[in-house]
């Protein structure tokens, strides 16, 4: 079992050469949002930018995309017609994905049946490596008898305890750390992709290897800190196509940035505070 330490960052952040240029460090596609929710994809996208990826495009229903466009000129936004994602958006999303290096999907999409079906179809049809978070996990729920294509082995799925139950049908809230590790490893092997179980100690497994991350603190219960983790995962995946190592490094960065922020803000900590302290981790 691997204990994640700061040395893992060297795999993603070597000294840059002088002759690098835009696109050398990835272009991430964030798919999320709805009529009600715009913050989730925005937080993921902002965290991704702070984590080193060169470009981030956010594809969202029109209202959410327009709100996100006002956050910062650093983000590219692509508004889609309607209040929610649906099957009519699949061709546009697949076209958008063609010049990207990774995706993040699920934050703030809500759970209309048509939206969940769209998420499953996009994951199945794109060749990109990606991160499945939040409502995207509901799209892969065991209750929907949905399974990822057996040829797809380039995803990071990022559930908390309740989402892990939604994903797998297994309740592990009261399990010991040892039992949680065994279950996460078994389920990652069954899904044939990386699972990053968020918690007091994050558990990451690809079905063979297991890693534990101990950064993070009790003040990170605030809404949005899972979105920042998804964005960091996406940023690292966009730069280095290694889901297990990307998930490990992202868990460390997100938790460490939260630890730095918590020293100052404690109960007042917000997801934006995590984002604004990512540079201090580096």
Image (tube, grey):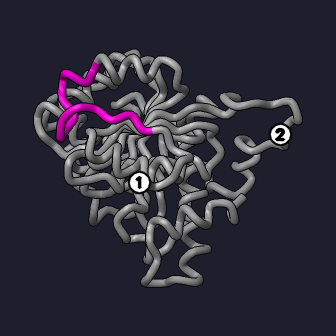
Q: Earlier in the sequence, mark 2 or mark 1?
A: 2
What residue lies at 48% left-to-right and 27% top-to-bottom? 129
Q: Is residue 35 left or right of residue 205?
A: left
**Quadrant the C terminus occupies:** bottom right
- Report x, y in % for residue 190: 34, 31
Q: Nearer the viewer, residue 106 or 216?
A: 106
Mark 1 and mark 2 in contact (Cβ < 8 Å)? no
Q: Nearer the viewer, residue 246 or 267?
A: 267
Q: CA gap, disc 2 to disc 1?
A: 28 Å
- Report x, y in % for residue 137: 28, 42
Q: Which residue is mark 2?
A: 16
Identity of the residue furthest to the right in this view: 18
Where on the picture, by quarter, is residue 172?
bottom left
Q: Is residue 214 visible?
A: no
Q: Is residue 136 visible?
A: yes
Mark 1 Cα-neighbour bin, 10 Å: few <14, some 14–19, many ≥20: many
Using the image, determine if residue 213 lies above or below residue 234: below
What residue lies at 16% left-to-right and 43% top-to-bottom? 111
């Amino acid at each position: 079992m691997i204990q994640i330490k700061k040395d893992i960052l060297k795999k993603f952040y070597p000294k840059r050469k002088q002759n690098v240029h835009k696109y050398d460090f990835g272009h991430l596609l964030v798919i999320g949002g709805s009529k009600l929710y715009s913050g989730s994809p925005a937080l993921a996208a902002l965290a991704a930018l702070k984590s080193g990826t060169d470009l981030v495009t956010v594809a969202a229903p029109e209202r959410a995309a327009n709100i996100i466009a006002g956050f910062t000129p650093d983000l590219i936004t692509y508004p889609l017609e309607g209040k929610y994602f649906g099957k009519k958006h699949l061709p546009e999303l697949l076209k958008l994905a063609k010049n990207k290096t990774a995706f993040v999907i699920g934050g703030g999409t809500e759970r209309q049946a048509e939206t969940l079906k769209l998420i499953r179809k996009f994951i199945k049809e794109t060749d990109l490596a990606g991160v499945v978070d939040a409502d995207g996990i509901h799209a892969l729920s065991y209750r929907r008898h949905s399974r990822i294509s057996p040829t797809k082995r380039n995803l990071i799925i990022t559930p908390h305890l309740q989402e892990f139950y939604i994903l797998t049908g297994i309740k592990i809230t009261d399990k010991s750390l040892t039992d949680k590790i065994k279950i996460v490893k078994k389920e990652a092997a069954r899904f044939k992709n990386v699972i990053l179980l968020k918690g007091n100690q994050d558990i990451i497994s690809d079905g063979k290897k297991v890693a534990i991350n101990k950064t993070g603190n009790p003040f990170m219960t605030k809404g949005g800190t899972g979105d920042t983790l998804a964005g960091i995962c996406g940023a690292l995946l966009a730069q280095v196509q290694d889901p297990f190592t990307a998930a490990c490094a992202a868990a460390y960065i997100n938790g460490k940035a939260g630890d730095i922020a918590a020293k100052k803000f404690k109960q007042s900590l917000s997801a934006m505070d995590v984002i604004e302290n990512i540079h201090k981790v580096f």
